[in-house]
Amino acid sequence: MPILLFLIDTSASMNQRAYLGTSYLDVAKGAVELFMKLRARDPASRGDRYMLVTFDEAPYCIKAGWKENHATFMNELKNLQASGLTTLGQALRSSFDLLNLNRLVSGIDNYGQGRNPFFLEPSILITITDGNKLTNTSSVQEELHLPLNSPLPGSELTKEPFRWDQRLFALVLRLPGAPSVEPEQLGSVPTDESAITQMCEVTGGSRSLRS
């Protein structure tokens, strides 16, 4: 039963609007809703578990856990508000901790007992952000840094905050505030480097742009 965790950027910059008048946060909500509808058409989705996490400080960042029903998930998604800082590093750490907490409860991580490939819990972490400057209470950061400290017992036995069966995918919004005067071309989304790019590649996931 795979876990799909949606990490939504709820920083104040997500209130900016594209030229169609829709805010970045509304675009993110619509993307999640569309994903859920398309995923529900797949018979393999019956065992899926969904989580909804934001950039708020823990534990307030957890809007819907894996035990919540679909109605609760969608209601929490609808009520998301954008305010605060772009604490992407801390939000990713909280998301991985949440996924690993479930592994701790289910006993999948068997340290000292050898590797059991059949003990796996496929997890996909989907982050939707505008990719602006990373901020915290004291400074603006150019690079993504995940806090090393974790409250989970046994976290010191794992070098990385993620596990081998966890993948990070990111949707970075690059929606212009004014319509383009140039004719649109298919596949012409400009490439750029976002702070989350390397993190996606390390986990075996990927990052895409939407403009």
Image: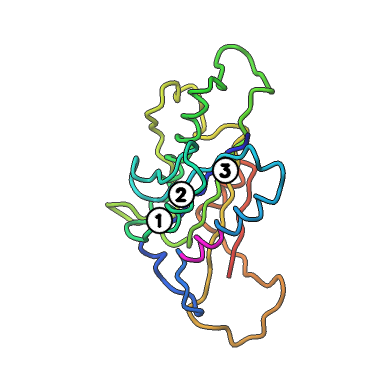
Tell me which residue sits at (60%, 11%) in the image. Answer: 113
Quarter of the picture containing the C terminus is bottom right
x, y (%) of residue 100? 49, 31
Gap between marks 3 and 2 measured at Cα: 22 Å
Q: Neighbour class for label 2 at 10 Å: few (<14), some, many (≥20)?
A: some
Looking at the image, is 15 positioned above or below residue 183?
A: above
**Which residue is the site of mark 2?**
144
Is 4 positioned to the left or the right of 140 in the image?
right
Query: Which region of the structure is painted magenta?
Result: 26-31
x, y (%) of residue 78? 44, 58
Disc with the residue nearer the chain's start (2 vs 1): 1
Of residues 31 and 116, the one drawn nearer to the viewer in this rendering: 31
x, y (%) of residue 33? 56, 58
Tag 3 secondary structure: strand
Tell me which residue sits at (48%, 75%) in the image. Answer: 18
x, y (%) of residue 15? 39, 68
Point out the residue furthest to the left here.
138
Tell me which residue sits at (53%, 68%) in the image. Answer: 174
Residue 134: give its label. Answer: 1
Looking at the image, is 114 positioned above or below residue 210?
A: above
Residue type marked 1:
Leu
Tag 1 secondary structure: strand
Residue type marked 2:
Leu
Tell me which residue sits at (39%, 51%) in the image. Answer: 55
